[in-house]
Every structure is written in C-alpha cells, then in structure tokens.
Image (cartoon, rainbow, N blue to C red):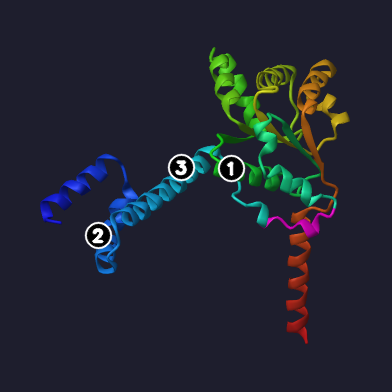
Amino acid sequence: MNELTMDRLKENLESLKMKNTLEILDNYLERAVAEKLNVVDVLDHIFAEEAKSKRRRAYEKQIQMSGFPIKKTLDDFDFSFQPSIDKRQIDELATMRFLENGENVVFLGPPGVGKTHLASALGLVAARHRFSTYYINCHQLIEQLKKAHFENRLPDRLKILSKYRMLIIDEIGYLPMDIQGANLFFQLIARRYEKTSTVFTSNKTFSQWNEVFADVTIASAILDRVLHHCTVVNIKGESYRLKERKEFMRQKQQIVNTLIR
C-alpha cells in the first residue's frame, strides 16, 4: 500500500469517526502482512474492535450524563452484610426485564443500608444495555420542577424527565415537601406511569408517605401508580456507615493498645 493510499484511508476513517481503527491501523496492518491474514479476517477484526470501542464510549458518555452520585456495581455490594435482601431478586432486576415491561422498583430502609448503591448499580446495568438513564435526588427534583413551573417551562421539563427509560429518584422523605412540590411530583409520576420505569429509594414506609407528600389524596394517587407494577425491596439491616465507623474505631483501639504495651 503506497503512502498516498494510506493517507486517503486515514482521512476517510477520520471522516467516518472511526477513532479506534485509526489508532490500531498501522500496527494491525503490519501484523496482517506478517501473518498473511486474508482480507475478510482483517476487516472482521478491525470492525469488531471499532464496534467494541463505540459501545464503550457510548456507555461512558451515558454514565457521564446520568448524574450517578456513586459508580459502584452490584458486584461491589456486600450482600452478606444485608441478609434481609434476597440476592436472587436483585439478580432478576439486573436482567432489565422490569425495564422492558415499564415496571417500577422501590428500595425501602433506614439510612446507610445500601439503597442508593443498589439503585445506582441498576442504573449502570441499564446504561450498559443502552437504556437512557438518569439519577436525581428527590429534593433536587422538586426544586427543578418548581423552577421550571415558575419560568413557564414545566411541560418541557416533564417531557424530558418522562422520556428516560430508567429514572432514579433518590431519598424520598429525607426532606419535607410542600403541597406544590407534591403536585409536581405527581404530575411526573403520572406521565411515566406504565410507559417507563422509575426506581425510588426512601427511608419512609409506605404508610408514612402521607407525611412525605403533605396531602393524603396526592400520596394515595402517587402510591397507586408507583406500586401498580412494582418490585419492593425492603432492607432491614445495619448501616454500612456505622459498620465502617465501628471498624475504624476497632482498628484505632488496636493501634492504641499496641502503643501502650
């Protein structure tokens, strides 16, 4: 292959945005010539690597845009520390069948038991499967909706939030919500109902959601739509943060005991 042809090939690859092929081309062509590979094998390898690279970049971009507070996977979760969780249930959720069926997931439990970890980990799985995914804290969500309402942009904001195949709403009940916030929250849930999947985390039991949403009627309407097609994971274990704190204090005491001996 002469230099002119090689330059033209690289220009075409750049025009086609085949970045990975541009990076591996020189070395791979040398190997192909040395090993006397046929054209089909060469093309197969190049296109396979390019496709793999594009999937990886798409996944990384999706993760970047999704707003996850943590990027821990299901493999990072210590199920032995939370025996109240049925791992088979989490594995079933990880198949993303609930997402394909437009069903919801609710993680309930006290602070620190891993609700955000599990919700975000499912979000990472969804992103890997090329499903549009977005994470947002409940308080931030309500503030965004109020701001959009004030600026006459509420329909547009609701439309955007309704399109995500998986929307993760974290920490429901940690901060009080007024009647306007509850109404806006209901509008979003109603628009997503039976069309797309929402993953919720909350430190409040369902019987306490009347207090969270400041109105019994609105709370009932929200729960009706959330729970109609839903998997509920009720976590009753100890806080991971308390576990880490206890471990830190234990190690600290061991050091002190060693020094005074």
Q: Residue furthest bottom?
A: 261
Horizontal and vertical percent for residue 15?
25, 40
Horizontal and vertical percent for residue 23?
30, 55
| Mark sitting earlier along the chain (1/3) | 3
Q: Is residue 101 above or below residue 185?
A: below
Q: Is residue 235 visible?
A: yes
Horizontal and vertical percent for residue 60?
48, 46
Magenta range: 76-83
Q: Amino acid at mark 1?
A: Phe
Crowdedness near tag 3: few (<14), some (14–19) or many (≥20) residues, C-alpha within 10 Å: some
Q: Amino acid at mark 3?
A: Ala
How much space separates mark 3 and mark 2, taking CA atoms?
25 Å
Between 190 and 28, the one nearer to me in the picture: 28
Between 52 and 77, the one nearer to me in the picture: 52
Disc number placed over residue 58 in the picture, else none = 3
| Mark sitting earlier along the chain (3/2) | 2
Q: Is residue 79 magenta?
A: yes
Name the residue beneath numbered marker 1: 68
Tell me if label 1 and label 3 are in contact, CB under 8 Å.
no
How much space separates mark 1 and mark 2, taking CA atoms?
38 Å
Q: Secondary structure at mark 2?
A: helix
Horizontal and vertical percent for residue 167?
63, 32
Q: Nearer the viewer, mark 1 or mark 2?
A: 2
Q: Quadrant of residue 176?
A: top right
Q: Amino acid at mark 2?
A: Asp
Q: Secondary structure at mark 3?
A: helix
Q: Which residue is at 60% across, 31% downward?
A: 165
Q: Quadrant of residue 137?
A: top right
Name the residue beneath numbered marker 2: 26
Q: Nearer the viewer, mark 3 or mark 2?
A: 2
Q: Is residue 97 above or below residue 259?
A: above
